[in-house]
Amino acid sequence: MDRLIEALAGKGLRTWVDRSAIVGGAVWKASITEAIRDCVAFLIVLSPNSSGSENVPKELTLAERHQRPIIPVRCEDCALAPAMEYDLAELQFVDFCGKQFDEAIGELIRAIGDEKAKEVRRSSGGQTSQLQFCIHCGARIPAGNVFCIRCGVRLER
């Protein structure tokens, strides 16, 4: 996973991973929901761990609900959980098993698409202020707001 993230960053693509992108004190369900809602493409990295997770199928359902392009990435041999099998049945996987890593990364970049990749590069280029989230409900806080628009709590600045 770390090698995949590093390779995508090397191609100018910004990634968000729940294990490292949720700030302390944030409501993790809300943070994950916001990230899925705002993503350009949803990569579901398939491994025995992700297939056995109770949360990954829920994340997949959210990506589908928010009409995000879903790209299954198979990093390890695994059986799909029944909760994911139906949603992924008609999608072409990008397979990292049995291939050279650089070849598989090239396929993944093509699956994301040049236009999507350019959009991600534009959105991540230059200096941007770090996103802030409400520590009470996890909602994204637009710059300059003094109240959380989701839960109404006054924000400390």
Image (cartoon, rainbow, N blue to C red):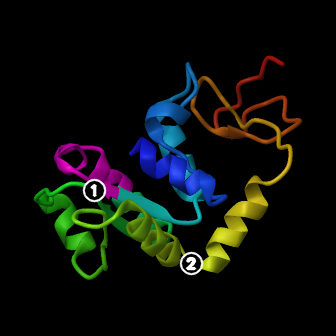
Residue 62 in which image quadrant: bottom left
Badge 2: residue crowd in 10 Å (few <14, some 14–19, many ≥20): few
Residue 122 in which image quadrant: bottom right
Picture coordinates of residue 34 (x, y %)? 57, 48
In the displayed structure, 12 sits above or below 88; it is above
Check if residue 57 falls in the magenta segment.
yes
Picture coordinates of residue 15 (x, y %)? 56, 50
Boundaries of the magenta span: 45-59
Q: Nearer the viewer, residue 48 or 65?
A: 48
Looking at the rendered structure, which numbered label has been put on residue 113? 2
Q: Nearer the viewer, residue 145 or 49?
A: 49
Badge 1: residue crowd in 10 Å (few <14, some 14–19, many ≥20): some
Q: Viewed as shown, does residue 8 lie left or right of 80?
A: right
In the displayed image of the protein, which residue is found farthest to the bottom? 90
Check if residue 99 falls in the magenta segment.
no
Looking at the rendered structure, which numbered label has been put on residue 75? 1
In the displayed structure, 154 sits above or below 87; it is above
Picture coordinates of residue 90 (x, y %)? 26, 82
Q: Distance between the Cα atoms at labels 1 and 2?
A: 20 Å
Q: Viewed as shown, does residue 95 lie left or right of 40?
A: left
Quadrant location, the N terminus: top left
In the displayed structure, 7 sits above or below 104; it is above
